[in-house]
């Protein structure tokens, strides 16, 4: 299951035409309250902007830039520390179990 935003807002930088690129599997997003974002933009640009005043953009046909492999998450590396700790735990349980069986036989 992945995070689904309720609303997306894109702000442009530089000269048009703009490209909206998406689908990078190893990217982690962050939340940023819109009021805070608009306030920071007002401080930088010196103009007041409300969300209702933002111009709408049109989209062209999608283009594949990085290929289909870019949208597949990379395999997670093996966590050797967890494997080692679980191995020590299982070995300890087996050792204590074998000691308990020996005591029961005596």
Image (cartoon, rainbow, N blue to C red):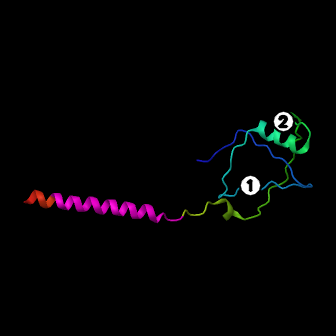
**Residue 19: x %, y % from top left:** 84, 56
Q: Nearer the viewer, residue 39 or 4?
A: 39
**Residue 35: x %, y % from top left:** 78, 36
Which residue is located at x 65 percent, y 58 percent? 26
Q: Is residue 12 above or below residue 75?
A: above
**Residue 97: x %, y % from top left:** 21, 58
In the picture, the disc for residue 33 is: none
Asked if the residues shown at circle 1 and circle 2 are in contact, with their CB atoms under 8 angstroms apart, the answer is: no
Q: Quadrant of residue 34?
A: top right
User: How many marks on residues?
Assistant: 2
What SS does tag 1 mark? loop
First reached walking from the N terminus: tag 1 or tag 2: 1
Q: CA distance from mark 1 to mark 2?
A: 22 Å
Q: Is residue 50 above or below residue 24?
A: above
Please identify the dominant SS of the magenta region. helix
In magenta, the rendered stretch is 77-100
Mark 1 sits on what residue? 22
Q: Is residue 81 left or right of residue 72?
A: left
Q: Classify 10 Å Cα crowding around label 2: few (below 14), some (14-19), many (20 and above).
A: few
Mark 2 sits on what residue? 51
Q: Nearer the viewer, residue 19 or 15?
A: 15
Which residue is located at x 86 percent, y 34 percent? 50
Residue mark closest to the camera, 1 vs 2 = 2
Which residue is located at x 22 percent, y 59 percent? 96
Quarter of the figure that contains the C terminus: bottom left
Which residue is located at x 66 percent, y 43 percent? 4
């Amino acid at each position: 299951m992945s995070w689904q935003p309720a609303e997306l807002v894109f702000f442009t930088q530089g000269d048009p035409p703009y490209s909206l690129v998406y689908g990078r599997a190893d990217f982690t997003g962050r939340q940023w309250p819109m009021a805070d974002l608009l306030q920071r933009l007002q401080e930088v640009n010196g103009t007041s902007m409300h969300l209702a005043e933002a111009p709408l953009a049109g989209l062209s046909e999608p283009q594949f830039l990085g290929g289909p492999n870019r949208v597949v998450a990379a395999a997670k590396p093996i966590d050797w520390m967890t494997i080692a700790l679980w191995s020590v735990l299982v070995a300890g349980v087996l050792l204590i179990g074998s000691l308990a069986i020996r005591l029961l036989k005596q």
